[in-house]
Amino acid sequence: MSTLGEVRIRVPGSVARGSVARARALLIHPNERVERKDGKAVDRNYRFVNRVVVSYAGQTISEFETSTSIGENPSFGFAFRASEPGALKVTFFDTHGGRFEAAVEVKVA
Amino acid sequence: MPKLSVTRRALLAGAAAAGLVPAWRARDVAAQGTLASLPPEEPVDRTMQRLFGSRPIRDGATLINLELPLIAEDGGNVAMTVEVKSPMTRESYVKAIYVLSDRNPRPLNAKFNLTPASGQAYVATSLRLADTGDVRAVAEMQDGALFMVKRSVRVVVAGCAI
């Protein structure tokens, strides 16, 4: 069963040193959309992911600013240069103070 | 001397973290998902104006590969990939990729900030699209140059309000 906050990261089995690899990170999260009543947006504290930070070997390599217009269970594909062996870490932040994170070791051959 | 600018929100968040304000107040500070925290509802032209002002935007057809389905059965989950053909070196790289949906009440879907360590200007995600129309990707280079491409997507079931 999937629970809110679960993060999954998919990376290639092994990466040649110095080459560029692609990864995908998924968060189980409703990423709420804005409700409408009589055509007007309802103002309340929606729970959605507003920031995603990707780091590799301790260095931030990219950062995504997101909103309600990304699908439920947001997933992001991105690239990174495997300059050295290290952990690929992805952190999702949501509007309710949630911080969801996972890391995988990248095998650099 | 640089001017110090401390917003009320940052101050409260800091105070909450330091345990200076009660927990209920801290929760209030964390509440950031209100309509005011989202980009305003506006036509896409106004969003473009807000993001890029009067900076020239060049045609990115030869540079940007924006992949989207021609027909999206479910507007709530439309797979998208963007790839910009550009070196990713310290001297020359793609600084940011913006994705906007022309027919969404709040057109900016996401902004992807990249660095040379990204190795490749590639991002993928799933979008919510409110209606049939254009989706555009804008690439901002490290020197500020802007390039744009558009793709039209037919949405069968709308991604709702968004």
Image (cartoon, grey):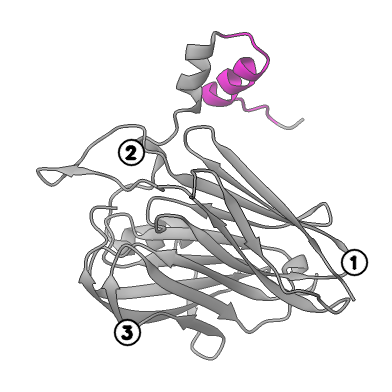
Q: Are marks 3 and 2 in contact (CB under 8 Å)?
A: no
Q: Chain of mark 2?
A: B
Callout 3 secondary element:
loop
The amino acid pointed to by label 1 is Glu
Q: CA distance from mark 3 to mark 2?
A: 31 Å
In the picture, the disc for residue B35 is: 2
User: Counting residues from the N terminus, which is met first, the one under dot 3 or under dot 2?
Assistant: 2
Which residue is more in the foreground, A6 or B136? Answer: A6
Q: Position of residue B27 (x, y in %)?
A: 49, 21
- Looking at the image, the residue that sits furthest to the bottom is B62
Q: Position of residue B22 (x, y in %)?
A: 54, 8
Label 3 neighbourhood size at 10 Å, few (<14), some (14-19), many (20+)? few
Callout 1 secondary element:
loop
Is the residue A24 above or below the residue A32 in the image? below
* Highlighted magenta segment, given as a residue range: B3-21
Same subunit, labels 3 and 2: the answer reads: yes
- Looking at the image, the residue that sits furthest to the left is A38
Q: Residue at x 28, y 50 (%)?
A: B41
Label 1 neighbourhood size at 10 Å, few (<14), some (14-19), many (20+)? some
Same subunit, labels 2 and 1: the answer reads: no
Callout 2 secondary element:
helix
Q: Chain of mark 3?
A: B
Residue B17 magenta-highlighted = yes
The amino acid pointed to by label 2 is Leu
Q: Which residue is mark 3?
A: B70
In the picture, the disc for residue A84 is: 1
In the picture, the disc for residue A53 is: none
Q: Position of residue B162 (x, y in %)?
A: 29, 53
Q: Nearer the viewer, mark 3 or mark 2?
A: 3
